[in-house]
Image: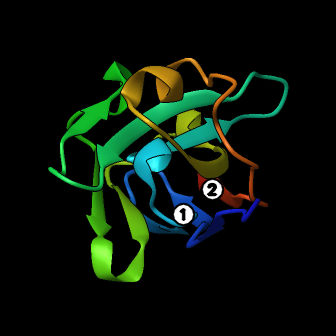
Amino acid sequence: QVQPVESGGGLVQTGGSLRLSCVAPERTFSTNAVGWFRQAPGKEREFVAGITWGSGTTTYVNSVKGRFTISRDNAKNTVYLQMNSLKSEDTAAYYCNAASSFAPLRILGSELGSWGQGTQVTVSS
């Protein structure tokens, strides 16, 4: 199974911005939706945002609404996460993965594919 490849993380001050990129697995009917996830030290991995390849429909968790924007470039098989107004609680390793729809993304369901290496985001105060 091809793993996604995440990049774009780094160290940024509170209130700053970062743009993450994910080269996603090959698009099939079973990977119609791509999501960004994050895992902070000592915490479980959580869903952050998702987008569908076809219509570009998006979904976000409440904690990032209005600050994060997910987008995609179908020609490059790449999904982006623009993160603005970053807070210390956004510090985490960020990952992407794909599924047939938003439902399995939100619950990190069993149909998700292999995880990539992730990219670290550190927000300093």
Q: Is residue 111 above or below residue 113?
A: above
**SS assignment at label 2:** strand
Query: Residue 46: x percent and y percent?
Result: 60, 27
Camera-side residue: 10 or 48?
Answer: 48
Neighbours of disc 1 within 10 Å: few (<14), some (14-19), many (20+): some
Neighbours of disc 2 within 10 Å: few (<14), some (14-19), many (20+): many
Q: What residue occupies the far front of the structure in this picture?
A: 29
Q: Residue at x 32, y 31 (%)?
A: 60
Q: Which mark is residue 97?
A: none
Camera-side residue: 102 or 21?
Answer: 102
Residue wearing tag 1 = 12
* Residue 67 quadrant: top left
Query: Is residue 30 in sight in this rendering?
Result: yes
Q: Is residue 38 above or below residue 21?
A: above
Disc number lying in front (1 or 2)? 2
Q: Is residue 110 above or below residue 26?
A: above
Q: How is the image coloured?
A: rainbow
Q: Amino acid at mark 1?
A: Val
Q: Residue at x 38, y 47 (%)?
A: 32
24 sits left or right of 75 in the view: right
Q: Are marks 1 and 2 in contact (CB under 8 Å)?
A: yes
Query: Residue 115: x percent and y percent?
Result: 75, 50
Query: Residue 16: x percent and y percent?
Result: 39, 60
Camera-side residue: 104 or 117?
Answer: 104
Alpha-carbon span between mark 1 and mark 2: 8 Å
Query: Is residue 125 in sight in this rendering?
Result: no
Q: Residue at x 29, y 47 (%)?
A: 52
Residue wearing tag 2 = 121
**SS assignment at label 1:** strand
Q: Residue at x 45, y 56 (%)?
A: 28
Query: Residue 55: x percent and y percent?
Result: 14, 50
Sequence-wise first label, 1 or 2: 1
